[in-house]
Amino acid sequence: MKVLAVFPAYNAEKTVERTLRDIPPGCVDEILLVDDASQDGTVAVAERLGLSVIRHDRNRGYGANQKTCYREALRRGADIVIMLHPDYQYDPRVTPLMTDLLILGICDVLFGNRIRTRREALAGGMPAYKYVFNRLLTLFENLVLGLNLGETHSGYRAYTRKVLETVPWERNSNDFVFDQQFLIQAHAFGFRLGDIPVPTRYGWESSSINFHRSIVYGLATLWTLFRWILHRGKIISCPLFEPKSS
């Protein structure tokens, strides 16, 4: 099976090499970096490291970056796609464990879970307000969706090809709520979701949205859940949860 890692990048010049070096040899067949019009030397560093690079001509947003990642990954014949932020916030050493669980057919979607204890999360640099928002939203999503994920807001994810071919992610937002829309869609289409522990690692170079953007993101997540409830109850029809062919 072809395993392809995608790096949705924005101003990751200082961290992309460290991220790459921590991926265990032999667990990934190809790495694709999609640069969302960075203002630093991200593209130059990625090309020097021998990565496949696609660059947006303008900043399109985090969700739009992922759309390019997945579109190209499918075109290149990937059977498993690992989405890893190149800002070194997540531990790439876990990559082969994530791929193995997908290859064995135990899960269809996997998330890196950064939160095992409050102490560990805060000691790893996660801002207190982000920790609180993360816990509340994760709890609410688990209750609504009937899941038992340790964290629903991780940017470290692995998907099988079938998931990417089934979920209508092209209809999703181009902003940060893309991740939550994808998670809810994957559940809505009957895929098996799981997670695996990874260290909490917030550094000064890690990408992070500010308090205001966090509020917007949280409200957008709740709105997506509400639309799913209405769609499931056949009160309205929401395109996010309709098959691609419709």
Image (cartoon, rainbow, N blue to C red):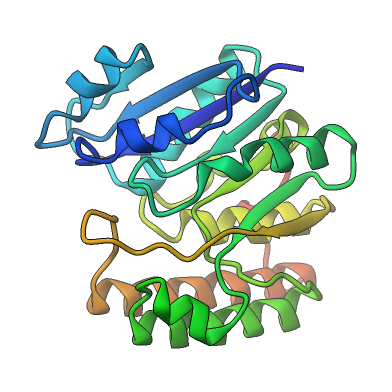
Q: Is residue 176 visible?
A: yes
The residue shown at (35%, 64%) is 202
Left or right: 10 in relation to 117:
left
Q: Quadrant of residue 105?
A: top right
Percent of width and height locating residue 32: 44, 22
Percent of width and height locating residue 171: 52, 45
Q: Is residue 204 above or below residue 51?
A: below
The residue shown at (47%, 54%) is 178
The residue shown at (53%, 65%) is 153
Percent of width and height locating residue 130: 39, 79
Q: Is residue 66 above or below residue 209?
A: above
Q: Quadrant of residue 48?
A: top left
- Image quadrant in which the N terminus is located: top right
In the foreground, 71 or 31: 31
Q: Is residue 241 visible?
A: no
Left or right: 21 in relation to 140:
left
The residue shown at (41%, 44%) is 85
Percent of width and height locating residue 68: 43, 29
